[in-house]
Amino acid sequence: MSSELDSGSQLGVLYYCPCSGCMRTTDAPVKASKQKREFAELAEEECRAPLDISTQKQLAVLRTWPIEKLYYCDDCSEVRCPHCVIEEPAGYHCPNCTFDVPTASVRSEKNSCARNCFHCPVCTHVLVVVVVESTQGDGGQSCSVLSCAVCMWDSREIGWEFETSTGISAQIERMRAGGPAVKEYASLLDYWRTVQRTASATAVGSHGLTSSASFKHRLTSAGLHGNTTSVDSLPPYKAACYVDSGAELTEDFKALEDANIIPFNGDPRTKEPQRVRLHMKLSRRCRMCHHILIKPESKAHNSRFKIQLLAANFLPTITFPNSLPASKARGSLLEHINTTPLRVGSTMPVVLRFTNPLYTEMDVSVDVGELDAAQTDVLAPRFTLPPFAELWEYDEDEDDSSLASPSASSSGRGSVKRGIIHQHGNQIAIQLDVTPRAQTQKLTIPLCITCTHLDDMAEMDTSDTSTPRRIVNTFWAYVSLGTVN
């Protein structure tokens, strides 16, 4: 199935997300403040506001996604795309040693692994700790160094030799403690913390509200022009590496300019190795109800999910079959589907296969939206998808004769057989007759699909004797058929 409906794609099915395309980044979680919750409610009302038909047609291209990239919120009973979900960190880990880092330690460790994980400054390969003979002091003493097994670089080229093979990061931090880069960073941090405290105190004293602005231009943009006198009264920043306010530089500042930590400056073999950056697992919530859609296991070595609400697990998957199994009487295993180029005025049969992912029956209704470029007739607008069962994955004897099964006739749906060209397990293939009316580079058929099924979770709960809840899902699918000559 094609993931994008571009000029080069021929056949593809994309699903429509009902969101308004709003890319909000300031969403209030469940325990957010009252001000944030009010802002989130206003944003949600704006996103739920109805749009005119012309705007919907323009946004349809931006809101269509393959079903593999969509989520499903069972509280809202709506499809959710990557644009209308909230991402939250679920855990941090090192991609090299798979060590799980507590959230409280991420900032203090500067978002890097605190163990012996470093990148080679030459080839960026992961370094290993080896024990070699020390080049410093008397001979015969051993030390630990960082070595690269690819380019044969080791930390002795920059003078790094460690006493022990553990706690390499802590030993490097002690070596850098008196360096010019650390000294300059600490001086900058102290100065801007003073600016932040002064600006916050001025905003609270004058307007009765707190401000998270740390710089003068943020206060100016917020309308606090007359309350920045205390910030202006602060002395200008004086670099820790300057002798005085003049332009003379000390040897420390010269060392800072030629620091080994600056990338792409000089010989890469003289650079310092960098610590491996941490990776994080993300959980996703619905923007409207903040219901959890995706929640992975926090452990790095565990690739499972605690919660995984994907659209492919709740809505039928629509595909274009290249071939269908033939009946036993025909003597062949596969019957190829004839596809001819689309031409103006000629009717072309299009076969769509619907697959039910649920363990309950699903009633499907297919309607065609307004389209001027072609006339589309759905030969089977109403049909029932059988439930999914694992045994059908191994059953290879079932063929087209299942269409004439007693269950189909007893359910009162004998008239629905017209247009259903194949049925196997939880899959049904229907036929659409498409007659193009004008030439176009990309013919797309909008289909409004309504699916109705019983809540299968209610059937598993034996203590609940009430009537199972009936769930109705309505969504749009855009079927791309290619170029019309």
Image: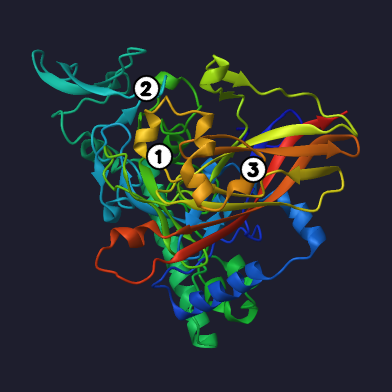
In the image, residue 132 lies at what x, y percent? 16, 15
Categorize mark 1 by other alpha carbons within 10 Å: few (<14), some (14-19), many (20+): some
Residue in view at x 66 percent, y 34 percent: 351
Q: Is residue 237 above or below residue 266?
A: below
Q: Relative to the observer, which residue lies in front, 194 or 17?
A: 17
Q: Which quadrant, please, contains the N terminus?
A: top right
Secondary structure under badge 1?
Answer: helix
Name the amino acid, label 2. Answer: His
Which residue position is annotated with label 1? 252
Pointer 1 with pointer 3, Cβ within 8 A: no
- Asked whether disc 2 touches disc 1, contact meaning CB atoms under 8 Å apart, the reply is no
Q: Is residue 248 visible?
A: yes
Disc 2 element: loop
Which of the two discs, 1 and 3, labels the residue nearer the N terminus? 3
Mark 2 to mark 1: distance in Å?
A: 31 Å
What is the three-letter code of the residue carrying label 3?
Leu
The residue that label 2 is drawn on is 125
